Image (tube, rainbow, N blue to C red):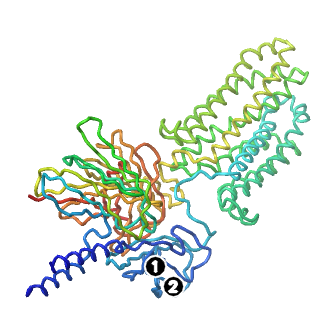
Amino acid sequence: MTRLVFLTVWLAAVLWAAPAAAHAVLLQATPADRTTLADSPTAIVLQFSEPVQPLVLRVLDTAGAGIGGTVATGAHTLTFRPDAVLRAGQYLVTYRVVSDDGHPVGGTIVFAVGGTPRAWVEAPEVPEGPWRWAAAANRALWMLSIALLAGATLFPLLAPAQRGDFKSALASTAAGASAIGITTAALAILLEGGVVLGGGSLLDLWRAGFDTTQARQSLVSVLLTVVLWRAAWQRDAVYTGAVLAVALLATVALTGHVVTAARPWISVPLLLLHATPALLWVGSFVPLLAIVQAPASAADRVLPRFSALAIAGVGVLAIAGAGVAVLQVRELGALTTTAYGLGLIAKSALATLLLLLAASNRLVLTPRILAGKERARATLSGAIGLELILGAAILAATAVLAQTPPPRSLVEPAEAHEHDGTGADTGVAVGAVAQGKSALIGVSPARPGRNTITVALRGAGWVDIAPLSVTAAFSHAAAGIETIVRELARVAPGLYEYTGPELAVAGEWTVRVEVLVNDFERVTYSVPIPIQ
Amino acid sequence: MSRSPLVAALFAAASLLPWPAAAHVGVEPAQATANTTLAVGFRIGHGCGESPTTAVRIRIPPGVTAVQPQAKAGWEVKTISGPAPASGVLQVDFVGGKLPANLFDTFVLRMKVPDAPNTTVYFPVVQECEMGVHRWIDAIVPGQPEPQEPMPGLRLVR
């Protein structure tokens, strides 16, 4: 009986103790995980849900060297005070603590010093809100203005004899387009800063904007616009003006998704082959209107020439445009499942409409005008006006696309150009099989610093399965770096990806990928990834 | 009671050992006689960090039959059965309650365990909280380190 009472009391005591024995949890870290600070922090504070004793608390730089400092233990907190100021760069705070239940808990947080304070964007997110729309509207206006300026400059070359007439008819268009082009180019830097920062003082926005490729495009285009205006419209240097006009159109390739693609040597020429004729086409509508409405017989000579050129130009721009689209979209399925794909479909629909209109103008109206039917002129004027509106709408769609991440950037490491030019095809890929399901786990470029981890679940066992989530846990035992857990984003069916700076130290990392197949089933792969 | 100091010392030592499933989902009792009907409690010992538990979902493994959940005040109990009339209960959900993170509670099912002595039947459990979720669904593989979120198991004996 005594024994029974004793047993009961003991059991109750143990059961009573059990719930309290939950592990400690990191509640808050200062600086927070994945943030950038302007200046060196004086202290790094980890706050836990329960009293903890530190086993390990180290701060590492990206070379893997430990930062000297002192560790203080508070009731629920650990505080690390670095001996010296942390220089600009990236740091890992790795900790392993033991809570009252004797269970060790470890983890790693990442932060950076130097730069505009912000939280890091995890996945390539679509910048939302008014900045994005303002930037898109501004970009559309800018494209329209350089198209009109280049069109007004180049079109008279079709009929050199009537150049004087064109010049007087188009001077105001060219002047207006130049002014709007310069204004919108300057404004683009500011708005791009807004897209990056999401708000802030005017000075901050300018600064942030100047760090982007938009600044390069804006500065070059403003310079070209000013020189073009003086050469072609003030000094009558026709051929200099023509070269400058083509160069101005080419500035569209100085920023945007194409520049950040993995193979710019193919995507940039393709874009130029698409954008230059396209912009020239849009820019030719105003001179066309002028010529159709002019009573002179210039139309008889210019219209057939323009038509011949337009057919060739449209062919080139359509083929090159399809090429750009393939590079950016990659998968047919992504056309309907991503915002970029839907935007592309909308743009293609508008372009098809424009093509049909142009074809009717050429096949029906142009022969009538050449045959001297005056009523056809008025009809053609209206049709060209409609073409101009459609062209502007296509430019607007293009500008919105420029603010939308293409599926390509969600599939491949977009920042290949930021590295040392060795391309995106470097890296490590490891195959693994667990519970009859195979996975391909890749890390690119597999060098210390920013890396992209890609998990492809496309082999045996994954047919018709859409996992609920995929997470990766990075750890580096030799360097004493505790596990860092990150969730991967789904970028295509069966393809998951995360880009971040966690693999900051060279050596052999262990990457544990957990795939949640459904609420009750999880597949875990653990692979070694060498970072060199 | 000459052995009682020894027994007491053993119990004391056992108390000091880390409670095997302290931070996991515990099964009470930890073992059962094969081919019998009994009540099995699933003990939830903590929330998700500081967040209270709001749902406990228990998968019934093959071989376990005649499942009947015990009513639980403050919780709504739902059973999910298979498509065939004979397939029985596949899953039991306790939802709509709120178990603070620092308290424990036991969710009880009555069941008939299979006639397979010297094996362990595992019950995948999903513990949902206001913020976060624990999935006690990792298989325990002998000879390998215990996974982070192991499935609770009931050892069957003869």
A248 shown above or below A79:
above
| Earlier residue among tags 2 and 1 | 1
Q: Nearer the viewer, residue A405 or B145?
A: B145
Residue A119 found in image quarter: bottom right
Residue B153 found in image quarter: bottom left
**Would you name the residue on which mark 1 appears?**
A59
Query: Dot 1: few (<14), some (14–19), or many (≥20) neighbours within 10 Å?
Result: many
**Would you name the residue on which mark 2 appears?**
A82
**What residue is shown at x 51% (from left), y 88% (from top)?**
A83
- Circles 2 and 1: CB atoms closer than 8 Å: yes
A246 shown above or below A262:
above
Q: The residue under label 2 is which amino acid type? A: Pro
Q: The residue under label 1 is which amino acid type? A: Val
**Is residue A472 found left or right of A120 in the rendered image?**
left
A34 shown above or below A133:
below
Q: Position of residue B19 (x, y in %)?
A: 26, 73
Q: Position of residue A249 (x, y in %)?
A: 71, 43
**What residue is shown at x 47% (from left), y 52% (from top)?**
A489
Query: Dot 2: few (<14), some (14–19), or many (≥20) neighbours within 10 Å?
Result: some
Distance (Cα) linking label 2 and label 1: 9 Å
Residue A339 found in image quarter: top right
Q: Position of residue A57 (x, y in %)?
A: 42, 80
Q: Position of residue A202 (x, y in %)?
A: 76, 63
Q: Nearer the viewer, residue A93 or A9?
A: A9
Q: Secondary structure at mark 2?
A: strand
In which chain is the residue bearing label 1? A
